[in-house]
Image (cartoon, rainbow, N blue to C red):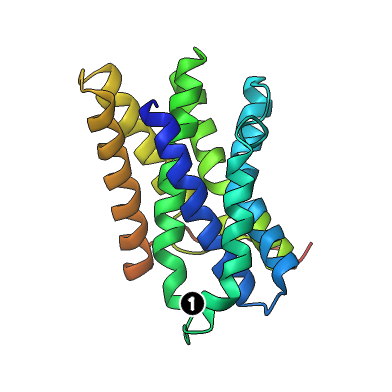
Amino acid sequence: MSYLVFIEFLAVIVSSIYGVLLAARKGMDVVGVFAVAFAVAFGGGTLRDLFLDRTPLFWIGNPHYPAITLGIAILSGVILRFIRHIRPLLLVPDAVGMALFTLTGTGFAIEAGVHPFIACLLGVITGTFGGVLGDMICNEVPSLFRPSPLNATCSFAGAWVYWGMLEWGGFAESYALLGGLVVIVATRLAAVKWNWCFPGIRDPGGSSET
């Protein structure tokens, strides 16, 4: 099993857990929990595969991935019964899942031979758009699109670190993956702790609503 495949496997598990926690905040039943977990775990990677014309889609080619997500969703009721405060738990699986999927997205794009800038963008899409879909299902404005602690920026920076360590530094893939992972998770956690965010852009002559 290659490093990227193993990292993708971990990303599915961590992102599914994040999706479960996200859905639990809305009091969804097991079907809703599975829908949110599925969207978070597979949304970004599906877009990546479509853009790269990779077939079958990664979760179709690995049917144990959605099976794992379903299992986590089914067990969520039992696990969450012992958890009183969900919001503090969201940050870590969010950051780690985003990092893992960003690196797999970037890595598979590099293997496809695309330009490094596009590879890093696809890494960001893979790492963040599952969360966007999850927020939309939960009827929330995605945090990616509003003033909030840096998200996609952390993903983009880590993707470049991963690529740079591979192509310029000559590091082994395992070290490059670790370097990218540390950068994404550390910057994301720091952004939340110190509220690093970009200001909202508003029409100075009109309403901010669309």
User: Of 184 and 174, which appears nearest the observer?
Assistant: 174
Q: Is residue 142 left or right of residue 177?
A: right
Residue 44: quarter of image? top right
Is 3 or 72 nearer to us in this picture?
A: 72
Question: Would residue 9 be seen by someone viewing this image from the given angle?
Answer: yes
Q: Which residue is mark 1?
A: 87
Query: Closer to the camera, 156 or 80?
Result: 80
Residue 100 lies, in percent from the top left, at: 42, 43
Is 148 left or right of 194, judged from the image as shown?
A: right
Q: Position of residue 5 (x, y in %)?
A: 45, 31
* Residue 149: quadrant of the picture: bottom left
State the residue at coordinates (32%, 43%): 181
Tell me if mark 1 has few (under 14), some (14-19) or many (20+) residues whose alpha carbon lies within 10 angstroms of its own. Answer: few
Quadrant that contains the C terminus: bottom right
The image shows residue 178, relative to residue 88, as above or below, that is: above
Residue that protrudes farthest toward the right in the picture: 210
Q: Residue 159's spot in the image, x, y percent? A: 39, 35
Q: Position of residue 207 (x, y in %)?
A: 75, 68
Q: Is residue 200 visible?
A: no
In depth, the one of 14 and 177 nearer the eye is: 14
- Compared to 150, does 89 lie above or below? below
Vertical placement of residue 15 versus 106, above or below? below
Tell me the SS state at disc 1.
helix
Q: Quadrant of the N terminus?
A: top left
Q: Residue at x 28, y 21 (%)?
A: 166
**Mark 1 belongs to which amino acid?**
Arg
